[in-house]
Structures are given as structure tokens and as C-alpha cells.
Amino acid sequence: MASETENRMRALSAATGEHSWRESLRRGLPPGVLEKIDGHAAEGMGGLGRFVLRFRLPVGILLILISAFMVYGVTKVQVATNFADFFPRNHPYTQLYEKYKVFGGAQTLVVMLEARHGTIFTIPTLNKISDITFDVNKMDGVNHNEVFSLGSFREGYAEAVPGGIDMHPYMYPNPPDTQAEVDELRKQVFIHRGALSHLISRDDKATLITASFNEEHMNYKELFDDAQAIAKKYTDKDTKIYLAGEPMVRGYGYHYLPAIMICFIAAVLAMIVLLYVSLGHRNIWWVPIVTGSLSAIWGLGFVGWMGYNFDPVMLVIPF
């Protein structure tokens, strides 16, 4: 037995005289349509609805022109991430960040090396720390003055000498190659434990290599791939490598962008199938698809014309 909704839809179709999508594209309205709308004005079917149906040709042309304008705006959308876009541009904290981010901002990559056995104070492990520091320094967009590790020239200790003070890097430019040099390094680390507490764990089993990046020259996908390559290269039976930081969080969005797009397309196809299954007996089952597509085009077009970037991480919001 047909439901009450289906009966009402059939009755409306019979009253309007439109039985196919081709008939719905005719310039003129079938007889009795405006009278039926006027008769249901109290139910909210008059006013704007009557105006749209009466002038549906100019209204349709106007919508097509606006949609074409927005389609061109879609071509201006760039798939990119700007960290400052997540915060109010005019807020004092955001302006302070923009002013001084050259000294080290939020785009900091953190690489942790952990010794599986013993401590980091072995010749092979210290060589890995120096090599990882060198590899991080080669990454695109890195701020070379903001790379910190035991193997960096930015980390050192002061030694009083007659007539002044000498600064000595812990391992720069070359790591220790004898056990005596390893013991001396361990001694200096113990003496300056407080200054190195942000780099070396208390049990000497792990150490950090940190690097800040210039946002104007960042490519999150390349950075993510390079960091993963470093982790894979130096992970072995004696060493574990961990990655963290804001660039890795954003990089995962670009890394999984193909999978996200597949899920997005699958969701759209599922909606189309459901609409056809539930409204296939109607000639206008495709209308929700068209209106939804136009809404998406207008939204993306507005983003493009306003000069905003489209962050891949935002694609997970519909799910």
C-alpha cells in the first residue's frame, strides 16, 4: 500500500501536469500551477515560491551565471595549509607570533632517538644523532639557526680560559670516534645537565633533534615524506625513532589525502544510490544532487574569490 507521502506527491504531479524532467524544463508553466500555489499560500507555498515559478527563466539564468562565476572561483582555490589561518588575524597574540616567528615558530619538527639497549653514549648511536641532525638540516624550508641537538653547532658549553671564555659544541662538527671522547662527552653532559634537560632524558636513553621551519617555504607533504624517510633510515635493532610536531600533524592530512578523497567520492556515490532507491519513482530524484552540488560549488567559489586556502585536514569534517 502506498504511503500518504507518496500519494500526495503523485497528486501534486498530476495537478501540475509535469511527468518527466524534459517537461519540467519548459519555459511556460502547466495550467493550474499558480492557482494551486495560491491555494496553499497559507501552508507556506506562496510568496517566494510563486515568484520563482512565475519568473523561472530569468531566475534560472541568474543562477547559472552566478554558478559559472563561482566555478571560476573554484579554480582559484589552493590546497595548502597556513598555520595562522587557524587563529584570528587581528588578535594581539597572533600578531605577536607573526612578528617574531623568525626566531622559531609553531612549525617545529621533533625527532626523538631512543636506544633500545643501554644509553645513547655509544659511538654508533652518537654517529646517528650527528647524521640525523645533518639530514634535518638538508630539509626544504628549515631554519638552520633553529636546529638543536647534541650534534648541532647551536648546542655547546662555556669553558673559562685565561683572558676570556671559550665556547665548545658538544659534538659539532664531528661526533666522538674513541671511547675516551665518548666518556668526555658524557662528563660534559652530566656537568651541564640543567642546560640539556630539554634534549636528553634523565636516564640517558633518549635524545631529541628539533628543527623549526619557515612557513613561507614549507611543503607539508615533502616534509612529511622526508621525516618518514629519516625515521625509516635510522630505525634498526639498536635504535627507535619517533616523530612529532605540528608539521607532522598537518603532513598526515596530505599523506592520506588520496584515501580521504576516495572516502569522499564513495560517500557521494552512496548518497546518489540512496536517493535513487528512495525517490527513483519520481522524475526529480536528481534535484537534491544538483542543489547539493551547487551549494558546494558556491562555497568553494567563495573560498577561492576570498583568497583562502583549502586545508586537506578539513575534508575529514563531513565524516
Image (cartoon, rainbow, N blue to C red):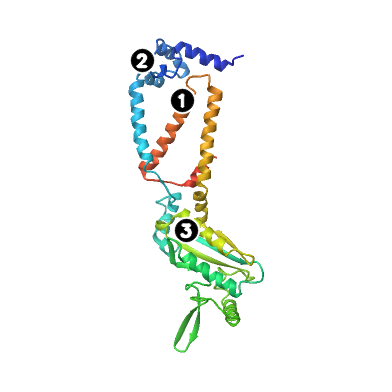
Q: Label 2: few (<14), some or many (≥20) within 10 Å?
A: few
Q: Which of 253 and 124 lies nearest the eye of the viewer?
A: 124
Residue in the image at 59% along x and 71% along y: 125
Q: Label 3: few (<14), some or many (≥20) within 10 Å?
A: many
**Marks 2 and 1, how far apart at CA:** 19 Å
Q: Label 1: few (<14), some or many (≥20) within 10 Å?
A: few
Secondary structure found at label 1: helix
Label located before the other in sequence (1 or 3): 3
**Marks 2 and 3, how far apart at CA:** 60 Å
Q: Amino acid at mark 1?
A: Val
Label located before the other in sequence (2 or 1): 2
Q: Amino acid at mark 2?
A: Gly
Q: Residue 257: where, in percent of width, then height?
A: 50, 46
Label located before the other in sequence (2 or 3): 2
Residue in the image at 51% along x and 50% along y: 255
Cβ atoms at labels 2 and 1 below 8 Å apart? no
Name the residue carrying label 3. 107
The reply to whether residue 149 is in sight is no
Q: Residue 40: where, in percent of width, then height?
A: 46, 14
Residue positioned most to the right:
117
Q: Quadrant of the N terminus?
A: top right
Q: Amino acid at mark 3?
A: Gln
Name the residue carrying label 2. 28
**Marks 1 and 3, how far apart at CA:** 45 Å
In front: mark 2 or mark 3?
2
- Checking the image for residue 101, the label placed there is none
Q: Is 315 left, or right, of 92 in this rendering?
A: right
- Checking the image for residue 287, the label placed there is 1
Q: Residue 73: where, in percent of width, then height?
A: 36, 39
Cβ atoms at labels 1 and 3 below 8 Å apart? no
Secondary structure found at label 3: loop
Residue in the image at 57% along x and 76% along y: 189
